[in-house]
Image (cartoon, helix red, strand yellow):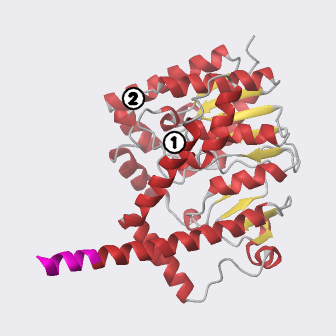
Amino acid sequence: MRAFAVTVSALLFLVVAINGFGAWESYRHEQRFQAVAAHLRPGQAVIIERDFDDRRFQRMRVQVIPRPAVVAFGSSRVMPVSGGALGLAPGQFYNAAVSAASLEDHLALWQLLKRSGHIPELAIFSIDHWALAESQEAVRWLAFSREVSEFLDGAGRGMGWAWDPVQRISYAWARFKELFSYTVLRASLTDIERAARGRRRYGAGVLESLQRDVVGEEHVGGRRAVRADGSLIYERAYDGQSVREVQEEAVRFARSGARGLAEFRVDRQRLARLELLWREMRARGVELVVYLPPYHPATWALIRNDHRAAAALAANAAAVGGVGARMGARFLDASDPNSIPCGPEKFYDGDHARVECLLPVIQRLLAAPRPG
């Protein structure tokens, strides 16, 4: 028994040590990207890895961009949309999307834009069902807890003096638990392997970082990158997928639960906060364009035939559309790809549409008459 306990303790210590090293490397890596974020210019892009912390990047980036006329809010499902694709001049558009975005992320990014004097004329919202879900994971957005607290206090809906410290403790606890995570362990081992191969991470300074990570958009070379306007360039591997491979992935995505659709319930507090956000935006003269993003045709077919999943999407559409109508937003439920239309060749996977699919959605909304 003692030998077993010693073995387990040794293995646990090893996991914590490896994950701790990986977390430190990741932190230093993100410090470098924060520095680089301040130096991006139109026509440039920063090379990234799939697991980089886009919330830290956005916190730095929105403070240094010129005031945009148009800002996009959402998750990775709207990230491919760029100013160039919308026909806007450099500096006129910014994509403020973050991965797995929740409603709180939207509040925080709006607060950062306000704080920086970068209030746009038009806001494009791509609203995912999980952004308003009761079961939405409350870990990632907690990195923005201070901005969320500022917004709620300013809107007269603050949670009291103890709310922000409690959220910060929750975030710290969630990060601490990652030290024991097998998923994090695999990522940490990848970091160690890169370090062993001599890959530089946090280097001699911003200049060296710029030379290594920031390139002209035309020189991205099939790597994953973020443009100066915040939009995402997917890596070449996605272009190498066949329509059949993407469809198979879309079917797997739907059958795995499509990000908890069957268990989805609208969080009424989050819905109320969405209305607070849009009410404040409208009071500051911001026009609102809102849509529910499309699914791959194969994913949509399976969702439509699943009573609980279809009911969840309908509930989300009714909730978002109702708030949008009260706030004078132009709204479109584009969940059904056939309504656009978007064929299977216009998707990266089950719920990530290519820009060729998203542009018609946005253009249709922009061409629609403004609500009275």
- Which of the two labelled residues, at mark 1 and mark 2, occupies the earlier sequence position? 1
**Mark 1 or 2: the one toward you:** 1
The answer to which quarter of the image holds residue 37 is: bottom right
Of residue 39 and residue 322, the one placed in the foreground of this image is 39
- Left or right of 159? Residue 34 is right
Of residue 326 and residue 332, the one placed in the foreground of this image is 326
Helix, strand or loop at disc 1? helix
Percent position of residue 248, x then y: 39, 55
Asked if residue 8 lies in the magenta stretch, the reply is yes
The numbered disc on residue 310 is 2
The answer to whether residue 84 is seen in the rendering is no
Question: Residue drawn at (55%, 36%), measured in percent from left and top?
Answer: 163
Asked if residue 116 lies in the magenta stretch, the reply is no
* Measured Cα–Cα span from mark 1 to mark 2: 36 Å
Q: Are marks 1 and 2 in contact (CB under 8 Å)?
A: no
Question: Residue drawn at (84%, 51%), measured in percent from left and top?
Answer: 65
Question: Residue drawn at (79%, 37%), measured in percent from left and top?
Answer: 114
- Left or right of 190? Residue 76 is right
Label 1 crowd bin: few (<14), some (14–19), many (20+), radius 10 Å? few
Q: Which residue is mark 1?
A: 166
Magenta span: 1-9
The numbered disc on residue 365 is none
What's under tag 2, amino acid-wise? Answer: Ala
- Left or right of 274? Residue 254 is left
235 versus 148 height, above or below = below
Percent position of residue 193, x then y: 50, 83
The answer to which quarter of the image holds residue 87 is: top right
Label 2 crowd bin: few (<14), some (14–19), many (20+), radius 10 Å? some
